[in-house]
Image (spheres, rainbow, N blue to C red):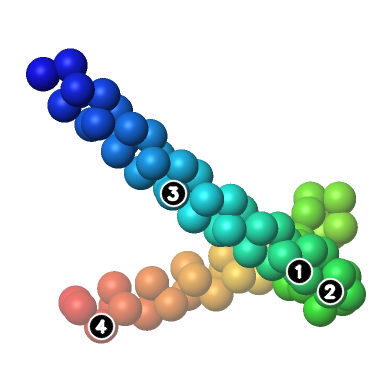
Amino acid sequence: MLVDTLKQLKHRKAAIRTEIAKLNVEDRKIDRVIKAISALPVAASAPVATAAKTKPAKKRKMSAAGRKAISLAAKAMWAKRKAKKK
């Protein structure tokens, strides 16, 4: 029984070493991809919008006369509709 356990442990150790070798190969592939991407020019990458680069939207300002003209036009429209109902 002890011999069987020892064989199982040796087999498991070999399997783990195989997995480690596969992971090392994959690690090297990933390193090559990272190196290739890092070598690309900065302009080729997608632009990143940051708060410092964007300008705040300008607020539209309406004069008091403009607001009054709109108000009078709206009141006239509603008065006209109300008169049609009667």
Q: Disc 1 marks which residue?
A: 37
Question: How many other residues sit within 10 Å of disc 3, few (<14), some (14-19) or many (≥20)?
Answer: few
Which is nearer the eye, 42 or 13? 13
Q: Given contact means CB atoms under 8 Å apart, are the residues at marks 2 and 4 in contact?
A: no
Judged from the image, the secondary structure of the residue bearing numbered disc 3 is helix
Real-space CA distance between mark 2 and mark 1, rounded to the nearest whole angstrom: 5 Å
Q: Disc 2 marks which residue?
A: 40
Could you say which quadrant of the image residue 73 lies in? bottom right
Which is nearer the eye, 42 or 36? 36
Judged by depth in the image, the label closer to the viewer, 3 or 4, is 3
For the residue marked with disc 2, what is the amino acid? Leu
Judged from the image, the secondary structure of the residue bearing numbered disc 4 is helix
Q: Given contact means CB atoms under 8 Å apart, are the residues at marks 2 and 1 in contact?
A: yes
For the residue marked with disc 4, what is the amino acid? Lys
Q: How far from the left and from the top, in percent, is residue 33?
A: 69, 67
Which is nearer the eye, 28 or 6? 6
Real-space CA distance between mark 1 and mark 3, rounded to the nearest whole angstrom: 29 Å
Looking at the image, tell me whether mark 1 or mark 3 is earlier in sequence order. Answer: 3
Question: How many other residues sit within 10 Å of disc 2, few (<14), some (14-19) or many (≥20)?
Answer: few
Which residue is located at x 39 percent, y 41 percent?
14
The answer to whether 2 appears left or right of 76 in the picture is: left
Real-space CA distance between mark 2 and mark 4, rounded to the nearest whole angstrom: 70 Å
Q: Disc 3 marks which residue?
A: 18
Q: Residue furthest top?
A: 2
Which residue is located at x 66 percent, y 70 percent?
69
The answer to whether 61 appears left or right of 28 in the picture is: right
Real-space CA distance between mark 3 and mark 2, rounded to the nearest whole angstrom: 34 Å
